[in-house]
Amino acid sequence: MATVSDPPPAAPATRAGEHHRLSGRLGPGAIVFMVVAAAAPLTVIAGSVPIGIAAGNGAGYPAMYVVAAVVLLFFAVGFTAMTRHVPNAGAFYSYVGTGLGRGAGLGSALVALISYVTVQGAVYGYVGFLIGDLVAGYGGPALPWWLWTAVVLAVTGLLGYRHIELSSKVLGVLLVAEVGIVLVLDAAIVGQGGSDEGLSSALVRPDAVLSGAPGIGLMFAIAGFIGFEATAIFRDEARDPERTIPRATYLALAIIGVFYTLSAWAIVSAWGDGSIVEAATADPGGIVVTTAAQYVGTAAADVMLVLFVTSLFAAILSFHNVLSRYVFSLGNTGVLPVACGRSHARHASPHVASLVTTAIGGLLMAVCAVAGLDPVLEIFTWLAGIASVGIVVLMLLACVAVVVFFRRTGLDRRPWHSLVAPGLGAVGLALILVLLVRNLPLLMGGSTPLGVGAGVLLAAALAAGWLLARARPHAARDLTTATPADNAPQI
């Protein structure tokens, strides 16, 4: 049931009896299910891995997941060390604001909103196309993609309106299914010894890892981790936030990193180091399903097609939960209208923020449909490109904020946690950001104007934080301290 608190007398915009607090008993496992689901493991294996192999460093591509995981591990060390000092559940913007000031925090909030709106929109477009293609392939009616997307929007909105534990159960079932089918494929490939060349050794050979375009490979690898960083947004619904959030963060990162590396290596092994690039280039969208049919059977390939759809739905639901909690947090701190910060009396959910999130997603998809955009080649690639850059910017700012915060306050004097790890994370993320920006047109479907426009949009959103801080002097006023003000509404 909901745990509620009345707003303080100093907040005249609220009325007695309104709820402004979330509650729950989520443990590390439940949070891991939600954030790993956002990473959409099956979608990454079936979609990103073939492209990373073809456009990146070929058979050495699986090693890029190891590199990405190490960089993000450095990020996670500082991120989790700061968790106990940031009681606000605003995740990135709370961390950045606490470390770098209210202007940077509000700018990060705007970047986060854009990033999660666009990544959710990207997956909405993709899932509508896939459902339509799947239904038509099995003899059903050939309906426009946006009709299927509207159905997914409605189901997601319903689950997001309810208590978070319902979403965690749904995501848990879907995640186990999609990970399970990939692990079955991995086991079959390894059990049969891979291709005629045997199991791949490129993963540990420097010449293979550095061949081709490893920078592009790393770019696609880091995009597969988007979502794991959202553990802190569930702080108020966690059973023991100071322990649960760090454990969930490390566990999610470890699961994603090991799963991606193992599965990408298995796909390479299935075709052989000498043949995988040609195969992935010839059929990037279907090579994994073809591999499943070859090594496991046609029934497994059919199941994988269905789970590909459920993987995307799980990602959408997870991103919806994250975005609605950002909106909820911003409503409670005075950045957005106070109504956005209300929680449901019975479900203890951010129901208003969830409705706002659903409406924004619906509006974005309606605009895309009216504009006649292709759901995969344009909606998915363009919006995912914006989100990839935005999330890396937020993680980079969070690393810098951790270092600045602990240098200024001295609350954690452990060099590894407060300086070395977040510093290394900042360097690694800065290099990845350079790669993303240089290749942003590639992420935006090959369009230079769109790539430049996306970069300008994110930069403008970040800069607008300082303007917003000046225009709204009372908004998010607790971001500059490690503990919330006594008269600030807590979320």
Image: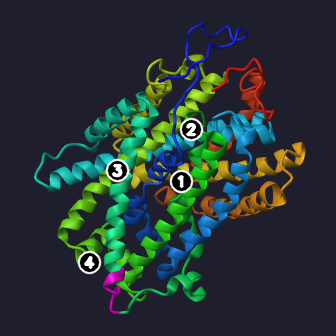
In the rendered view, tell whether residue 384 sits above or below residue 204: above
Front in this rendered view, residue 187 or 29:
29
Which circle, 3 or 2, is nearer the viewer? 2
Magenta stretch bounds: 190-196
Distance of label 4 from label 1 (alpha carbons): 30 Å
Q: Magenta-highlighted stretch: main secondary structure?
A: loop
Earlier residue among tags 3 and 2 = 3
Query: How far across and down, in percent of the image, does residue 220 sit?
Result: 52, 64
In the image, what residue occupies the spot 60% across and 45% down? 244
- Please indicate whether residue 429 sits to the left or right of residue 276 in the image: right
Residue that badge 1 annotates: 226
Which circle, 2 or 4, is nearer the viewer? 2
What amino acid type is highlighted by mark number 2? Ala
Earlier residue among tags 1 and 2 = 1
In the rendered view, tell whether residue 93 sits above or below residue 393: above
Residue that badge 2 annotates: 238
Report helix, strand or loop for mark 4: helix
Mark linked to residue 295: 4
Earlier residue among tags 4 and 1 = 1
Which circle, 3 or 1, is nearer the viewer? 3
Report helix, strand or loop for mark 1: loop
Query: How far across and down, in percent of the image, does residue 62 sit?
Result: 50, 75
Residue that badge 3 annotates: 174
Mark linked to residue 465: none
In the image, what residue occupies the spot 46% across and 38% down? 320
In the rendered view, tell whether residue 484 sits above or below residue 462: above
Distance of label 2 from label 4 (alpha carbons): 41 Å
Residue extending farthest to the left is: 139
Report helix, strand or loop for mark 3: helix
